[in-house]
Amino acid sequence: MKRLLEGARVVDPVRGVDGRFDVLIDGDRIARVAVEIPAAERAGAEVLALQPGWIVCPGFIDMHVHLREPGQEHKETIATGTAAAVAGGFTGVACMPNTDPVNDNSSVTKFIVERAAGAPARVYPIGAVTKGSAGEQLAEIADLRAAGCVALSDDGRPVANALILRRGLEYARMFDMAIIDHCEDPALKGEGVAHEGLVAAVLGLRGIPAAAEEVMVYRDIALAELTGGRVHIAHLSTRGSLRAVRDGRARGVRVTCEVTPHHFTLTDEQLKAPLSYDTNLKMNPPLREAADRDALVAGLADGTVDAIASDHAPHHYDEKHVEFDRAPFGIVGLETAVPLALDRLVHAGVISIGRLVELMSVNPARLLGVPGGTLEPGSPADVTVLAPEVTTTIDPARFRSLSRNTPFGGWTLKGTVAATIVGGRVAYANPDLASLAAR
Amino acid sequence: MNLQVANGPLGTAAARLRGKDLLGIAELTPAEILLVLDTAEAMREIAARPIKKVPALRGKTVINLFFEPSTRTRTSFEVAEKRLSADTLNISAGTSSVVKGETLADTALNLEAMSPDLMVVRHTSSGACHFLSRICRAGIINAGDGMHEHPTQALLDAFTIREHKKRLGGLKIAIVGDLLHSRVLRSNVLLLTKLDADVWVSGPPTLIPPGIAQLGVRVTTSIDEAVEGADVVMMLRIQLERMQGGYFPSLREYFTVFGLTSQRVRRAKPDVIIMHPGPMNRGVEIASEVADGACSVILEQVANGVAVRMAVLYLLAGGGEHEAAA
Amino acid sequence: MPVLMDAERVARALMRIAHEVIERNRDLNELALVGIRTRGVPLATRLRANLREITGTDVPVGALDITLYRDDLMRHPVGPQPLVRRTEIPFSIDDRRILLVDDVLYTGRTVRAGLDALIDFGRPRAIQLVVLVDRGHRELPIKADYVGKNVPTSSTESVRVRLQEIDGHDLVLIEKEEEQK
């Protein structure tokens, strides 16, 4: 089955491509990208109509997603999570192991892989670093690798014991797998629920100081340096952490990091108004000060930040509809990440589309060691089609995710997803835009 | 005998609090604060009558919903409600369905099904009253939410200060103690700065909320500096659990460095008034002889609490857009 | 706006009322004046001065705020709460004859509230009502014992009393509704 994406702007930074090109898909692979594809090659291809202004990119991969299955299917399932992913423009997601049971052994990994078999987006499981993510004993990493895990993490928690992290980094080096660490010192975090600063002080909320994240980032970088292993800082949120990553990178340490859309958009000021103590503003790490947010935006532009990842954390309405202290941490993000990135970064002049593709496709694919990140012929036909000039209003009621815990409801953003193609098939076509009807 | 004749422009002055709730001092304008204090003046006289009751809230139902134990605040509200002839209901967390795992939202909505006009709520979580105000039609009066605010305490403190000093603006007011965990501190700082007092806060560095100087107060770890020349000294309670948190090494050391002793009181103005929201830890934040001394107005605060709460209940129970009232 | 009573008229009415009070009350020492806030208070004070001038007896005066006893409290779906002022009755009202004083008697509801409030203070032997103007349209069975002036009015009109102590001058006016702001 051939499909042709005709005459749109194609942005493929790995190959230095940014211009008007045709893209020919054959089966589940990219066959050709050329200014004009010869008639003989394109014969019999289904032509997908693209609007002027749309942009064709290698498929975006969200490397930090909580799919909640197995064990918490009332919040999300692999089916609904991947439906949300393609609606958000993602052709692939890496799912965190803090399910129930924890993905710390191959049978859970196989379960996830099997459940994901018919899913609209590709699912790359991340395995636990330690058994039960309890931080005491390494999980059977080779086993996890063989079953399909692409990286390791105890996300939700840090790997608190430095010796365990050291061993994990050394061991995982055998498989060239990164350890994705949720950097947080448990003692400094204490019972904190918001960023330690003036806003939390005024609202009477227990604070989580920036240092709680930073001491672990420094530690992880030192251990990566010691072991030669790869450490990836999950959801980096403070300017101090960014500085540490920059310095470590300059010394040649194999440290990488990701930032969430809510951290490059919001600050703790949001907690005060208009909806004070909104539990849809409660996540970990918390929303930080403006200076942190601004530093992250700069880091996205100057290359210090490697990836944008949503940390999509669905929670049921009842769980969030409680007083602030009791609400679980986390917000959904798959269906708001691209509009926020386009509006707040690209249209704001902070980054180019090419850089956006690096942050959301090229680097995630490289860091996870999975195919993608480019439209090089022979690559999987995973394509994200952006409509950067279309303005939309975020409507949580229309989310494909099972959960609606987002603070962005009602936000008007410029830039959205037109279509998502996975393995050559149109997994998602934006129903509000002109249809991609075959001609 | 001198009779005061009210000099209102048209005879009966009228004013109101915006909204159906009292969630915090943060939401009050200085004019609204003064309205409460002026109304409390009139309410206080009722306590001196032979029949300590007026029919103003007759037929109104007020529920006292306390998720945190409290004798003093709850009884103060209850007396205030009864003096206004309201029907009162007391619900304490320990005996209620909360123990059975019912959420805060469900507890409140179930109570609301019985059409209360007002709910007085004390809760361990900051922001709990904001949450309830969004989901309940009844007016919510914040009787203390976590570490956030305790607005009626700040109002009765201001009332007490005004009683003695005839004004609030320009007074040097020192607040000393566990600033970090205190909702009384936050409400008082907001109220006193809104009314242009010169507020000094003091406590161990481990118990000073970050950024508090940006609220317009002077911050010092020296109680002597805070108390020097003060018109009012307000002592906050130290909880023993704070020692476990490593905030300071011992109660003895706390008293030595931060306790209000007679000697320290002498640094203040000769007509200084000493206040404490209660309950006191004698010998920890305040010496016994100071608590019981001539400058102490601690018991007056308690009496004024009833009048101030009557004023708040009166101002919220009538008027306003909430036709939900019975 | 037609003037019902000028300053001189007001003064003469109050003097005449003082004489009537003396005529009807044998023992002035039993008497006490209670003015209903706001304008009942200066009227009560003037009446006391008149009584002292005529008889040499000093009758005590108190001020009563009836806001918390109004029957229309809490009934307005929108609108402000009336401001509550202090009540000051620095004497016992038990066994006294109370002269309740107000500026205008209209529906009678204010006086009813005043009676309820007084009875919460004690048990007077008797209560008599003094008003400067009675404008009719009673909604309750209330009658004034001493009246400065009877003025038939329609319900679209209102009677405005200005007193020196509050407004800077003495005047009683009648206003039609259209003339009001």
Image (spheres, coloured by chain):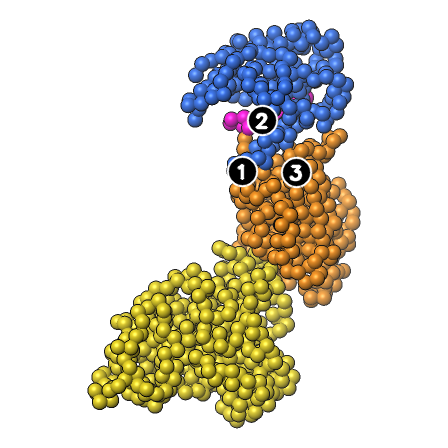
Chain colours: A yellow, B orange, C blue
Residue B13 seen in the figure:
yes
Same chain for mark 2 and mark 1? The answer is no
Residue identified by numbered label 2: B6
Tell me the number on the disc at residue C77: 1
Say whether marks 2 and 3 touch (CB < 8 Å).
no
Front one among A316 and A328? A316
For residue B148, what is the image quadrant?
bottom right
Q: Quadrant of the N terminus of chain B?
A: top right
- Numbered disc 3: secondary structure: loop
Q: Residue A86 location in percent, x, y?
A: 42, 75
For residue A12, what is the image quadrant?
bottom left
Residue B161 seen in the figure:
no
Residue at 64% in and 53% down? B110
Picture layout, residue C24 above or below residue A220: above
Q: Amino acid at mark 1?
A: Pro
Is B2 within the magenta?
yes
Residue identified by numbered label 3: B59
Q: Quadrant of the C terminus of chain B?
A: top right
Please tell me which of labels 2 and 3 falls first in the chain.
2
Q: Amino acid at mark 2?
A: Ala
- Numbered disc 2: secondary structure: loop
- Numbered disc 1: secondary structure: loop
Q: Which residues are magenta?
A: B1-12
For mark 3, name the chain: B
For residue B55, what is the image quadrant?
top right
